[in-house]
Image (tube, rainbow, N blue to C red):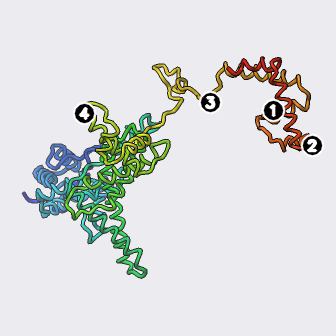
């Protein structure tokens, strides 16, 4: 069909607007796809308002618009502006339309900002190869919730569960990046004069190695938890065991050699177990025992459990000594070292109304009956001493420590009274003879039984 002349088209202005489609998730009103029924009435209505004389011309314009609505750049002019229908028809007729281009345009529009970030990273870091694991190197954003958590262990397990596990290929790739990062850090530390471009590249490689290290650590935190569960109930809290195991995991990441061909978890298990057992040896016991002795105690406990299963009874020290290649006396000594101390304030019973210390006898405590007897003896002794002279009572009291519990020598007593030690000995002998008289000693003999 022949297009109308320019003059005729000028008399029939058409208000035409194009709207680029947004993401479906945005919730905003979206433009229907080209060829949908909503596009044709809008075009015909605007053509009718513009008083288009030829109906066929309007249909031709509408069909052309339906085919190329997505390929036309958005018109930023005021909607009230008039668009030359003939000119638009001629441009659209010359514009090729391909299904591949429409599909690519739709995918690019729907991807939105999420697809822009990786592309930007590739442009900035030209010359370095990215892997699928690079997108997870950045720490995940954590949502802070109000209020304190009631179970810190559950909260920790929930946090580490967000990181996906790694396969063998990903572990090797991360290990290579870690090794490259360490090499770059050594180069940066040793070199003084580096070209700016080379320095930037080394800094980027070092930073990438640190990201890979964090990724490998976060992906294996659940391995630490599984190993720490085996050591619960031995004097340390579960979270403390996890933290000590994490230190061993860090050491394993630094020492891992991917060229050996085994998985990282196999290698890291030994470092994690060593870190946990060393921490238990240093911190779990109230009385610290050296690490080498803790290993002997653990070995003795393992052999004792095994022999208990084999013999059906508790093994004797001689049997344990033969199995461990040590003397029976050494076995008994090691068993004493392995005993755990218990607090005297440990509650007993279901109600916890009594403590363990209530059942332990205090050998140094004074028995009430003995305390009463001792008090009566002191009273009787003072009554007997009152029958003596002041000097005789003083010499006997100082000689036997009846006053302060510290016996004094004859010389010390002689200096107090200003006489010789021989004179003090004579006074002591005379006084003891008086005290042995039945009138004085009978009341004291009853306390000798």
Pointer 4 local density, CA inside 10 Å: few below 14, some 14–19, many at least 20? few
Q: Nearer the viewer, residue 446 or 125?
A: 446
Asked if disc 4 and disc 3 are in contact, CB closer than 8 Å, the reply is no
Q: Distance of mark 1 from mark 4, alpha carbons?
A: 64 Å
Q: Distance of mark 3 from mark 2, alpha carbons?
A: 41 Å
Q: Earlier in the sequence, mark 4 or mark 3?
A: 4
Judge from the rendering whether residue 104 lies leftward or rightward of residue 160; answer left or right. left
Q: Residue at x 39, y 53 (%)?
A: 247
Q: How many marks?
A: 4
Which quadrant, please, contains the C terminus? top right
Q: Nearer the viewer, residue 284 or 155?
A: 284
Place of residue 418 in the rendered image (x, y in percent of width and height, measured from the top left) = 92, 43
Judge from the rendering whether residue 339 lies leftward or rightward of residue 274; answer left or right. right
Place of residue 78 in the rendered image (x, y in percent of width and height, measured from the top left) = 33, 55
Residue wearing tag 3: 364
Q: Secondary structure at mark 1?
A: loop
Q: Earlier in the sequence, mark 4 or mark 2?
A: 4
Which mark lies nearer to you, 3 or 1? 1
Residue 403 is marked as: 1
Residue wearing tag 2: 418
Residue 161 visible here: no
Q: Distance of mark 4 from mark 2, alpha carbons?
A: 79 Å
Residue wearing tag 4: 311
Q: Distance of mark 4 from mark 3, alpha carbons?
A: 42 Å
Place of residue 308 in the rendered image (x, y in percent of width and height, measured from the top left) = 28, 34
Q: Secondary structure at mark 4?
A: helix
Residue 119 falls in image quadrant: bottom left
Q: Earlier in the sequence, mark 3 or mark 2?
A: 3
Q: Secondary structure at mark 2?
A: loop
Pointer 2 local density, CA inside 10 Å: few below 14, some 14–19, many at least 20? few
Q: Earlier in the sequence, mark 1 or mark 2?
A: 1
Place of residue 98 in the rendered image (x, y in percent of width and height, measured from the top left) = 11, 59
């Amino acid at each position: 069909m022949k297009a109308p002349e320019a003059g005729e088209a000028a008399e029939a202005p058409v208000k035409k607007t194009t709207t680029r489609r947004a993401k479906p998730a945005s919730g905003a009103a979206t433009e229907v796809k080209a060829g949908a029924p909503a596009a044709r009435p809008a075009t015909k209505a605007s053509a009718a308002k513009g008083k288009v004389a030829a109906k066929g011309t309007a249909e031709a314009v509408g069909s052309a618009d339906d085919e190329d609505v997505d390929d036309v750049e958005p018109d930023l002019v005021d909607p009230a502006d008039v668009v030359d229908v003939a000119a638009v028809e001629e441009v659209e007729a010359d514009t090729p339309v391909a299904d591949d281009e429409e599909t690519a345009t739709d995918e690019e529009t729907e991807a939105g900002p999420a697809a822009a970030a990786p592309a930007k990273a590739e442009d900035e870091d030209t010359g370095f190869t990215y892997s699928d694991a690079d997108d997870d190197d950045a720490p995940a954003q954590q949502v802070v919730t109000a209020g304190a958590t009631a179970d810190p262990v559950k909260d920790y397990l929930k946090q580490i569960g967000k990181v996906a596990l790694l396969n063998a290929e990903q572990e090797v790739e991360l290990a290579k990046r870690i090794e490259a990062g360490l090499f770059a850090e050594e180069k940066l530390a040793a070199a003084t004069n580096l070209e700016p471009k080379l320095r930037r590249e080394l800094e980027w490689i070092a930073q990438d190695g640190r990201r890979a290290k964090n990724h490998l650590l976060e992906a294996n935190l659940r391995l630490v938890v599984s190993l720490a569960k085996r050591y619960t109930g031995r004097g340390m809290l579960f979270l403390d065991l996890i933290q000590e195991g994490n230190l061993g995991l860090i050491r394993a990441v630094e020492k891992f050699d991917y060229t050996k061909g085994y998985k990282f978890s196999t290698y890291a298990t030994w470092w994690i177990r060593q870190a946990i057992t060393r921490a238990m040896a240093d911190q779990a016991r109230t009385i610290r025992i050296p690490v080498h002795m803790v290993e002997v105690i653990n070995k003795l406990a393992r052999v004792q459990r095994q022999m208990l299963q084999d013999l059906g009874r508790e093994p004797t020290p001689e049997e344990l000594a033969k199995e461990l290649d040590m003397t029976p006396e050494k076995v008994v000594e090691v068993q004493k070292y392995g005993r755990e101390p218990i607090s005297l304030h440990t509650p007993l019973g279901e109600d916890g109304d009594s403590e363990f210390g209530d059942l332990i006898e205090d050998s140094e405590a004074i028995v009430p009956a003995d305390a009463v007897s001792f008090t009566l003896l002191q009273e009787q002794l003072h009554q007997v001493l009152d029958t003596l002279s002041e000097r005789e009572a003083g010499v006997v009291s100082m000689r036997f420590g009846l006053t302060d519990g510290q016996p004094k020598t004859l010389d010390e007593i002689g200096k107090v009274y200003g006489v010789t030690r021989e004179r003090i000995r004579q006074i002591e002998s005379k006084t003891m003879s008086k005290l042995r008289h039945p009138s004085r000693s009978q009341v004291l003999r009853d306390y000798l039984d």
